[in-house]
Amino acid sequence: MTKKLVFGHKNPDTDTICSAIVYAELKNKIGEEAEAVRLGEVSSETQYALDYFQVDAPRLVETVANEVDKVILVDHNERQQSVDDIDEVEVAEVIDHHRIANFETNGPLYYRAEPVGCTATILTKMFKENGEEISKSQAGLLLSSIISDSLLFKSPTCTDEDVKAAKELEAIAGVDAESYGLELLKAGADISGLSAEELLSLDAKEFSMGNSKVEIAQVNTVDTEEVLLRKSEISKAIKNTISDKSLGLFVFVITDILTNDSTVIALGDEASSVNKAFGVELKDNQAVLEGVVSRKKQIVPPLNEQLD
Amino acid sequence: MTKKLVFGHKNPDTDTICSAIVYAELKNKIGEEAEAVRLGEVSSETQYALDYFQVDAPRLVETVANEVDKVILVDHNERQQSVDDIDEVEVAEVIDHHRIANFETNGPLYYRAEPVGCTATILTKMFKENGEEISKSQAGLLLSSIISDSLLFKSPTCTDEDVKAAKELEAIAGVDAESYGLELLKAGADISGLSAEELLSLDAKEFSMGNSKVEIAQVNTVDTEEVLLRKSEISKAIKNTISDKSLGLFVFVITDILTNDSTVIALGDEASSVNKAFGVELKDNQAVLEGVVSRKKQIVPPLNEQLD
């Protein structure tokens, strides 16, 4: 049995980092050699969870084919969100909760996707199925992932299964989900000291929609106005990204974790698709999407429908 | 809860028909409305299993969007193997054991693929996970699928999990897997009375490989020479199919279920890729592939590597 690397998507968020760590540990427990790695910087939110539960961040890698033949993807499947040399290795497994796109294999594989809010929820079930105990720190990381992806259970992506898993994990981790969760989200919403470029790459994902490359970046905040004060600087950075990556559309989503509304800044040749997709009118490239907090469930599908 | 249609691939084989029947029944048992349908004629092998266990064949459909909004795919995921109007419905679930390709969704879904020999093996596990009993006829259909896909456990696609599931199903179904299985395979290998066109479409699948459309059709036989006596008639039918469907390659695989070797007839602009893929030399468009019985594991991957 040769070692497999386990990793989530680029611009890693808490679910991607924590799920990679915990799934590699589960693999080791059941006798398979696996190591978690990451494809980008650890966010301040994720670092808060790692510090709280005293777990080291995975090793940063830029390529994987120089180390292993087989990999395990967690929390993503789309090629453009994965490691640059993904085509040079065999994907042995995928554990994910997103749509499937731009994913293709030569041979059969283990693929497990469920329409739940978080990869960590699926992993919680997999520990049970394998008859393995979840440790305190594993429970803490999995709980942090669910809180992060569900914005403390308020996102429409949050399912009964996520809530059920979180309750079980809360007991094992020995924290109060509500109070710990708010501190976790606030740690992630602290964007002071970040450059516009860093702000855009905190949680950015690229998608193929129709003939266009679309990047959607999201930040959580407790003060939308504070972010919008830097709009001209941010817009300039977006335009540079569009030009560098030949994007058809860049949508920057500022999500208020207290009101659960999002303000978007949309730029690029396909920017007008935002109007049709969400029934809004961009003014100065900006619009408020009321009640929209989920990129996966509320932003990607209507945009994809417009551009496909 | 609205009804979902459950179906396998075009040119249905035993696993595709039986898995659709049994998974729809499992769905009904756990309170979800589902109906199995099929996308093509029932083969003589599958009919043998249905008759033996006294189960009706599913209803034949040509389109699904006129009936339902959501569907469940079993035993396939590639668009070109699915119903013609697959793009007009939402794929709610996939239960499969093949590579993933030409598959894309707008939103998250339940996707379960495992690298085992047969969809029926995954379904056997899913009954247990849902705490539901497998009935005698369900066990018979699932066992027939495993025997069919694994050529009585002799194919390299057959895993320990398939053998384990078959043993459990054998006891519930009340048959001897070896003797029942040989009769089942012989029923499928009886190709007397079939036209060349019927022979080619018995178990044919189309694949996208690189820029080429490739069709690979397979027949099982206990007498390869008997099939090769009709080579000129078969070659003519292959050429017509290539022209009708603009294929780059058609590979007709004649698999001897007693010796476990296959003889292939390969035609089309990309026919020479067969030489490189399998280390053989086509003579008069024909070659023997020793020890090759599995399209999925032994034919698709090396061909895909050549053409990709």
Image (spheres, coloured by chain):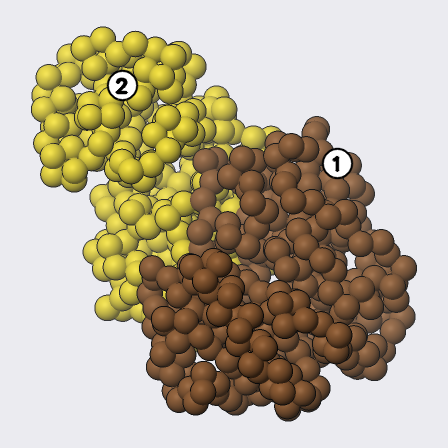
Chain colours: A yellow, B brown
Residue shown at 15% from the left, 16% from the top: A231
Nearer the observer, B107 or A155: B107
The quarter of the picture where residue B281 lies is bottom left
Q: Is residue A143 left or right of residue A237?
A: right
Nearer the observer, B208 or B156: B208
Residue shown at 85% from the left, 70% from the top: B171
> Do the residues marked 2 and 1 share a common chain?
no
Q: Is residue B26 left or right of residue A214?
A: right
Q: In this rendering, is residue B25 above or below B163?
A: above
> SS of the residue at dot 2?
loop
Q: Is residue B206 left or right of residue B197?
A: left
* Circle count: 2
Q: Which mark is residue B33?
A: 1
Q: Which mark is residue A272?
A: 2
The quarter of the picture where residue B257 lies is bottom right
Three-letter code, disc 1: Glu
Asked whether residue A143 is in view, the answer is no
Residue shown at 45% from the left, 44% from the top: B104
Residue A250 on image: x %, y %: 23, 28
Residue A97 on image: x %, y %: 48, 42
Three-letter code, disc 2: Ser
Circle 1 Cα neighbour tier, 10 Å, few/some/many (<14 / 14–19 / ≥20): some
Residue shown at 30% from the left, 61% from the top: A87
Residue B34 on image: x %, y %: 73, 40
Q: In this rendering, is residue A42 above or below B168?
A: above
Depth-wise, is mark 2 or mark 1 nearer the camera?
2
Do the residues bearing badges 2 and 1 touch, measured as CB atoms within 8 Å?
A: no
The quarter of the picture where residue A208 lies is top left
Which chain is indicated by disc 2?
Answer: A
Residue A110 on image: x %, y %: 51, 59
Circle 2 Cα neighbour tier, 10 Å, few/some/many (<14 / 14–19 / ≥20): some
